Amino acid sequence: MNLRTVGKAVGGLFFPLFVSLFVASLSLVQITAAPMMEPLFTEVLSSQVAGNEELALSAIKAGCGSRASMDVQFSGGSLSVDCTLLKSATGIGGVAKAYFSALQSKTYQCSFIDCPPEILLSAQGASLLNTASLIFLALSVVFGLMLALSLQGFGIAKGIGASLTLVGLSYFTKYIPIDLPFDSMRVIIEIFASNFLIALYAGALLLAVGFICEMAMGKKNA
């Protein structure tokens, strides 16, 4: 087994894997940002107090009293919410914003592997996701170069293109019928799909360039 064969096998396996992980982690960074999550928080809280929003809002403000913050139960843990934000809320949307602000500022004493899922909504989690996405990007480049160096001529464009197309096929999972509990969750699927669509387009373009150039070169040499 020569080095080219090893390069094709290792690069062909790990290049699409780490590109997929890069796209997924990048999508999570976008999804967990405030503009994406606050509408979902609002919808979730609204569903819990449907028809009693004014009463719930009054109870939340009364619960603050003269305190600077109020501890609330969230996902099996405690969350310290700024009472200034809660008292200034004019609706459930304001309460959701206060809750999300508390989640973003919360810190966790754990490693990324054993942390609770809600860490992804915190600034600490965003930093970890950004770091992970950069690591996956670097590894994608390394194994992409390994794959490219194991190929020749227009086979490089075809090989890289085929791998990116394989990654981009995840785009079509958006068409799998799923019953979502909240309409705002549809945005999450759209973000993942749009990022994988970029990989699909890039892969298809490289494949087309590789085949067209190879055919043109074949006719020229004929």
Image: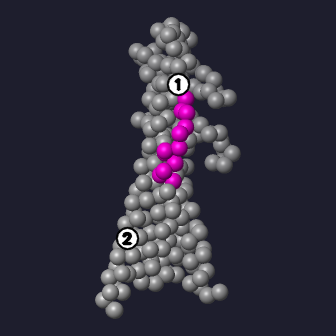
Classify 10 Å Cα crowding around label 1: few (below 14), some (14-19), many (20 and above).
some
Please tell me which of labels 1 and 2 falls first in the chain: 1
Image point (63%, 23%), residue name: 73
List the single residue furthest toward the bottom.
222
Query: In screen coordinates, is 149 left or right of 116?
Result: left
Q: Which of the two residues, 165 or 13, is positioned nearer the viewer here? A: 165
Name the element at disc 1. Answer: helix
Position in image of residue 199 (x %, y %): 44, 59
> Dot 2 corresponds to which residue?
208
Rendering coords of residue 161 (x, y %): 44, 69
How packed mark 2 is, by other alpha carbons closer than 10 Å (few <14, some 14-19, many 20 or more), is: some
Compared across the picture, whether 129 is left or right of 109 comes to: left
Query: Is residue 101 in sight in this rendering?
Result: no
The percent position of residue 43, horizontal first and vertical second, equals 48, 24
Q: Is residue 175 magenta?
A: yes
Residue found 45% across the figure and 79% down from its top:
155
| Numbered disc 2: secondary structure | helix
Stretch of the chain drawn in magenta:
170-181
Residue 194 visible in this rendered orientation of the protein? yes
User: In front: 189, or 52?
Assistant: 189
Q: From what the image shows, is residue 150 above or below residue 171?
A: below
